[in-house]
Image (spheres, rainbow, N blue to C red):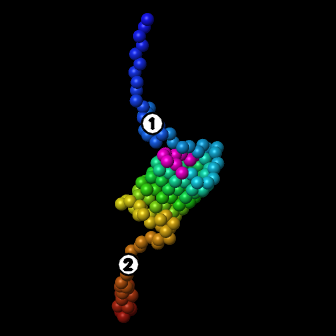
Amino acid sequence: MTDFGVETVEVASTNGGADPLGLEPKATVLAREDSVSGKLALKGPGQVLGNFSGEIDCDGDLLVGPEAHVEANISGDRITLAGLVRGNVIARGRLKITSTGRLEGDATVGALVVQEGGVHYGVIRVHPEGIPDTLPERMAHIPAQSTVVTLKTVPNPVGRVRKFWGEFF
């Protein structure tokens, strides 16, 4: 008769704990052919490759693919735009607009990267020290700070030269 040894391995619970296999969490993906509207709340990384309208809140990295068409307000940690986005964006970390990306709306970001060919129509507020805790609705109504410069008028020296030389001719 043969004896078999059984080894017991303790595995952490997958309910709210770490993945026992040590695998990376999977990204939520909206495929190219898909079209969704509503509120999308992602607790990890995500990719929008199709059409979406509504609101997106992502706790991880968010990629809007090159063929995507998104009409939504987006908030997330690190956002990469390679497709068209119409709406306001709040990136707590970094907003990257690739060479094929287009943002039509305002953006409040911690850091900004725009590749050559990337397009943005709207106002960008960059807060390298971190985005303030002001409500996003109020952020859109706070005017951008500008520096006021008072210009001193200087007499026109050309007029004086003409007047001077006019006396001789």
Q: Is residue 59 left or right of residue 160?
A: right
Q: Is residue 166 left or right of residue 71?
A: left
In which quadrant of the rendered image does the N terminus lie? top left
Q: Looking at the image, can residue 99 be seen?
A: no
Q: Earlier in the sequence, mark 1 or mark 2?
A: 1
Q: Is residue 90 left or right of residue 164?
A: right
Task: Determine whether 118 is above or below 140 in the image.
Answer: above
- Residue appearing at x 47%, y 71% in the figure: 142
Q: Looking at the image, can residue 1 be seen?
A: yes
- Residue appearing at x 41%, y 63% in the figure: 132
- Residue appearing at x 54%, y 51% in the figure: 41
Magenta stretch contains residue 65: no
Identify the secondary structure beneath mark 1: loop
Magenta stretch contains residue 47: yes
Q: Could you tell me the amino acid type at mark 1?
A: Ser
Q: Position of residue 146 (x, y in %)?
A: 41, 73
Residue 93 image label: none
Q: Is label 1 or label 2 in front?
A: 1
The front one of 108 and 119 is 108
Residue at which label 1 appears:
13
Residue at which label 2 appears:
149
10 Å crowding of disc 1: few (<14), some (14-19), many (20+): few
* Disc 1/disc 2 C-alpha distance (Å): 63 Å
Tally of numbered discs: 2
10 Å crowding of disc 2: few (<14), some (14-19), many (20+): few
Residue 3 occupies quadrant: top left
In which quadrant of the rendered image does the C terminus lie? bottom left
Identify the secondary structure beneath mark 2: loop
Magenta-tinted stretch: 41-49
Q: Could you tell me the amino acid type at mark 2?
A: Val
| Residue at the extreme bottom | 167
